[in-house]
């Protein structure tokens, strides 16, 4: 991975602040730039939801920040974690930063947990990562107790049994809880949850969401939810960033984005949701993929607004000129030359 490291800590009020992030992968057809100038930030106790259809660059953005992309990826821009630059940091620096640092709960615990290691091994690995060898031996019992406490904290009913188990011996919900425990073992300032709830049934999903909210409150953790699911967003996110074709096309406080969606892509996403319950657990939602057409080819992105080829109201200027995020309301930005819709301005009393 290539990026420009910065040495000294800089000031940032945010737990994580990403600026002008670009990620390019080599492909047989040429370089594919799948993240194109992303800016995101999240503060202590805040929940940011990053939403967008499959392939929009949500996961790659966060993997870049966590230093988890293959070395073939070219990464540029800046990511300040507690004011410290993490893009381009050495493995050693990243290990140090990750504990206490950034925690990640992956899309599918069945593939992120090692199937041939017990939960005890996997959880202790997280715990011992930042303790030296002598300490480690001396503290073995203490670490085991910490592992039990962590499992207890995430609501595993019999921590000792869980510690002896292999991943396949646990239910999907329990595996998810173990993943959260492993992430918490690093006492992260930022927890990144990547589609963490998709494989779970609705009741377990709601329990996991409540669990993360409680942990967030207690530990002051900032949470980034990466999701397709606008129902989840409405219920839990303070702010939302909508990604399309490697760019943030709209962002703001959740109510502002839901009440006054301005980018035609966001408007399309919301229009495809027949109903979102006030508590955000609505299940009548349609998948994002329901929108007509396909996103652009990252090897050959269009010069103008990336959504223009699919946009029902694009004009030639949209096709030709790129759009930057601009303020469209209080705590609300959109990358579009579309005017704020008339009905929205009326509702806002503009
Ligand atoms: N290692 C890689 N090499 C080449 N291309 C990659 C690699 N990893 C991801 N990509 C591409 O980057 C783009 C963005 O992928 P990413 O996983 O970030 O999308 P996403 O928005 O998180 O989608 P999903 O919700 O399906 O995970 C996709 O086109 C994907 O094919």
Image (cartoon, rainbow, N blue to C red):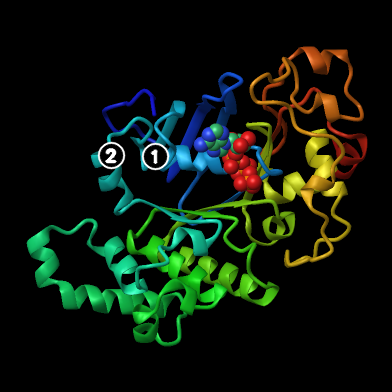
| Residue 47 image position (x, y, % from top left) | 56, 54
Horizontal arrangement in the rendering, residue 196 relative to residue 228 (left or right): left
Secondary structure state at the residue bearing disc 2 = helix
Q: Nearer the viewer, residue 333 or 59?
A: 59
State the residue at coordinates (28%, 39%).
91
Q: For the residues marked 2 and 1, what is the alpha-carbon distance in whole angstroms?
A: 8 Å
Q: Which residue is mark 2?
A: 91
Mark 2: few, some, or many residues within 10 Å (few <14, many ≥20)? few
State the residue at coordinates (58%, 18%).
30
Q: Is residue 108 above or below residue 205?
A: above
- Residue sitting at the far left: 134
Q: Is residue 127 above or below residue 81?
A: below
Q: Which quadrant of the view contains residue 347? A: top right
Secondary structure state at the residue bearing disc 1 = loop
Q: Nearer the viewer, residue 27 or 138?
A: 27
Mark on residue 67? Answer: 1
State the residue at coordinates (9%, 71%).
138
């Amino acid at each position: 991975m290539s990026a420009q490291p910065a040495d000294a800590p800089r000031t940032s009020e945010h737990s994580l602040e990403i600026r002008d992030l670009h990620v390019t992968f080599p492909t047989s057809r040429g370089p594919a730039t799948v993240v194109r100038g992303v800016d995101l930030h999240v503060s202590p106790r805040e929940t940011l939801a990053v939403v967008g259809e499959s392939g929009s660059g949500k996961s790659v953005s966060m993997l870049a920040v966590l230093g988890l992309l293959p070395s073939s990826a070219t990464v540029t821009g800046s990511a300040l974690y507690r004011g410290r630059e993490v893009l381009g940091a050495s493995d050693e620096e990243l290990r140090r930063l990750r504990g206490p640092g950034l925690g990640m709960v992956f899309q599918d615990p069945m593939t992120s947990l090692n199937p041939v290691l017990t939960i005890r091994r996997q959880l202790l690995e997280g715990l011992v990562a930042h303790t030296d060898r002598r300490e480690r031996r001396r503290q073995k019992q203490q670490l085991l107790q910490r592992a039990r406490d962590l499992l207890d904290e995430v609501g595993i009913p019999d921590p000792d049994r869980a510690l002896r188990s292999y991943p396949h011996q646990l239910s999907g919900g329990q595996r998810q809880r173990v993943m959260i425990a492993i992430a918490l073992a690093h006492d992260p300032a930022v927890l990144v949850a990547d589609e963490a709830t998709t494989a779970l049934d609705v009741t377990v999903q709601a329990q996991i969401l409540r669990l993360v909210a409680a942990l967030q409150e207690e530990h002051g953790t900032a949470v980034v939810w990466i999701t397709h699911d606008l129902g989840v967003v409405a219920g839990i996110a303070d702010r939302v960033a909508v990604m399309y074709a490697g760019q943030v096309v709209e962002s703001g406080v959740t109510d502002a984005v839901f009440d006054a969606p301005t980018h035609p892509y966001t408007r399309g996403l919301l229009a495809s949701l027949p109903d979102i319950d006030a508590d955000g657990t609505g299940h009548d939602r349609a998948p994002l993929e329901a929108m007509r057409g396909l996103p652009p080819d990252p090897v050959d992105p269009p010069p103008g607004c990336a959504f223009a080829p699919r946009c029902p109201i694009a004009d030639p200027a949209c096709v030709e000129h790129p759009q930057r995020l601009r303020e469209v309301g209080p705590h609300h930005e959109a990358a579009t030359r579309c005017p704020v819709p008339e009905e929205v301005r009326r509702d806002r009393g503009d």
